[in-house]
Amino acid sequence: MNIIITNSSGLPIFEQIENSIKQAIFSNELKEGDMLPSVRSLANELKISFLTVKRAYDELEKSGFIKTIQGKGSYVAPKNLDLIKEEKLKEIQSYIEKIYEISKLSNIPKEEVNELFKMIFEEEL
Amino acid sequence: MNNIEIKNVSKKYEGFLLDKISFNVPAGTVVGLIGENGAGKTTTIKAILNIIKSDSTVKIFNKDIHQDEKKIKQDIGVVLDDSFLSDYLTPKQIKSVMKEIYSTWDEEKYNQLIKQFNLPENKLIKDYSSGMKMKLKIATAISHNPKLLILDEPTSGLDPIVRSEILDIFRKYIEEDETRSILLSTHITTDLEHISDYIVFIDKGKIIMNAQTDKLLEDYGILKCSKEEFSKIKEDDYVSYKKGKYQYKVLIHDKNNFKKKYNMTTIDKPSIEDIMLFYIKGER
């Protein structure tokens, strides 16, 4: 699994870790039941505070991607299709928000953007 | 569980007051003490170790240092700026001294660290470089497997390679046993970004900040803006600012909130050094 942390992205480090692990789960590199590195060892490897890694793991657990068993470690949780769909929808939404922003900034009317949408979706059919 | 708990540590010298310093060092964490020269870092450390008398409550491993000093100190490893290993000893001879001092002295560990650090065993310490001396001090301090390490400026004056080696030792030390802690003071704040879990910032004898390192780096931001824009910012929304000819630089302590409130988006990520400089040198 690759976890790439950069200072130039505006994202907080815990979110970068969270995203890298999610990506590994989506791409099936990490499978159900696989064990994640311990918080401490990952923190040492990435040379960051263990509290940052812990926060990333807590978030992943909250959103159902991993399960932590006290004293044993963290595992990849069984895949939840709804969860994945929701995650992807969120991603799409963020892109649409970007489209909205650009069109607003450059004064491109909604209709023209809609046209583009139609064009791309129909091409596929 | 806190390995160190200090409350209202105060100490008065002529022209200097250490004013009611209170903070904790939780088990499993590295706490960094930062501040200018003369801010009170070393005084704080010495008060914790009961080397200087202070009016205070200092608890280490939940015991009062004023009452159980001897017992507590068996479980602490200390490196002070002026801590002293005689120049006319060799690492081999230090071993036989330390064995007598600490009941838990781990000779094997010491030998292994000396080897790992490439320290010649039979060379007099006076012929050591400053980096080698510091590595030897650290090896000596952790070879009785203490539960707590207290270090005053362990990386100052050392080159980046030695510094990163030393930080690796600290990381390994905590990883080996997560009930351990490290308290270190430094003015090389970049080191802290890579190792500390909490940062305590002392200025002119007072604590002006005690925060989680990652939160600090995440929440704070440096806004670059024009004079007109700056005049719109409410006083509660920034810490301090620096006036330039062409731009204002403003330290803000909650950049996400700030972005929502104001329409200014040129906000850089600060380093701990930036934050420190803004607190000490910035205008208010």
Image (cartoon, helix red, strand yellow):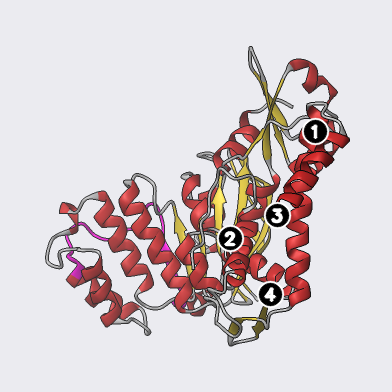
Q: Which mark is residue A124?
A: 3
Residue span colored magenta: B73-91
Discs 4 and 1 carry the same chain letter: yes
**B21 and A21: which one is in front?**
A21
**B215 and B257: which one is in front?**
B257
Please, is residue B256 above or below residue B241 in the view? below
Please, is residue A89 above or below residue B102 in the view? above
Mark 2 secondary-structure assignment: loop
Q: In which quadrant is the N terminus of chain B drawn? A: bottom right
Percent x, y for residue B138? 35, 64
Residue type at tag 4: Phe
Secondary structure mostly seen in the magenta stretch:
loop
CB atoms of marks 4 and 3 within 8 Å: no
Q: Which mark is residue B197?
A: 2
Spatial separation of the CA atoms under disc 4 and disc 1: 35 Å
| Residue at the far front in the pictured view | A125
User: Which image quadrant for residue B123?
Assistant: bottom left
Question: Does residue B203 show up magenta in the picture?
Answer: no
Nearest to viewer (mark 3 / mark 1)? 3
Percent x, y for residue B185? 50, 52
**Residue beneath label 1, please?**
A103
Spatial separation of the CA atoms under disc 3 and disc 2: 51 Å
